[in-house]
Image (cartoon, rainbow, N blue to C red):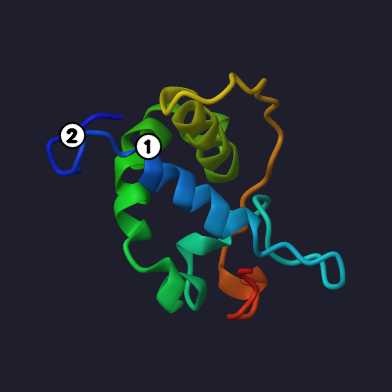
Amino acid sequence: MYSTEYDDGCCAPLLLRLAFNQSATFSKYDGLGGMNGSTLRFEPQISYQHNNGLTKAMQVLEPIKQKYGDNLTYADLWTLASYVAIEEMGGPRIEFKAGRSDASDGSACPAVGRLP
């Protein structure tokens, strides 16, 4: 979670932003967005202007995904990373529950403009 690339040496804010930008897109009306699917990995969502720089967060987490392969979804990894980031920045410990699924392509990407 630490690197000299970041102002204070910690990438926790970037990991939290990744989870926020994915989770805040959920719509109860069409069921798209949110953490399930981790669609931010795909076009067109990754190219939305408000997601600029989030590929770096994905790169930070990719070695963990590669280590655990199919036993860990991107959706669970991003959620867990945000929980650890919150705790690392002085927030509470949040109990993690696995079970989120990944989309296989960008067909489930939410439309641009869903972030508050």
Residue located at (55% from left, 30% from top): 83
Residue 35 in the image, given as x and y percentages of width and height: 65, 50
Q: How many labels does the image show?
A: 2
What residue type is disc 2 on? Ser
Q: What element carries label 1?
A: helix
Tell me: 26 left or right of 55: right
Q: Name the residue under label 1.
A: 12
Relative to residue 14, is residue 97 drawn left or right? right
Q: Is residue 98 above or below residue 41?
A: above
Which mark, by number, is residue 3?
Answer: 2
Of 46 and 51, the residue lying toward us: 51
Above or below: residue 11 compared with residue 18: above
Residue shown at 24%/29% (left/top)?
2
Within-10-Å neighbours for mark 1: few <14, some 14–19, many 20+ = many
Residues marked 2 and 1 touching at CB (< 8 Å): no
Q: Which mark is residue 102?
A: none
Question: Percent x, y for residue 99?
Answer: 71, 34
Residue reaching furthest to the front: 90
Q: Is mark 2 on a helix, strand or loop?
A: loop
Depth check, front residue: 19 or 93 = 93
**Residue sitting at x 31%, y 39%:** 11
- For residue 69, side relative to residue 73 (left or right): left
Of callouts 2 and 1, which one flags the residue occurring earlier in the amino acid sequence?
A: 2
Quadrant housing residue 13: top left
The kind of residue tagged 1 is Ala
Quarter of the rendering occupied by the N terminus? top left
Q: Distance between the residues labelled 2 and 1?
A: 10 Å
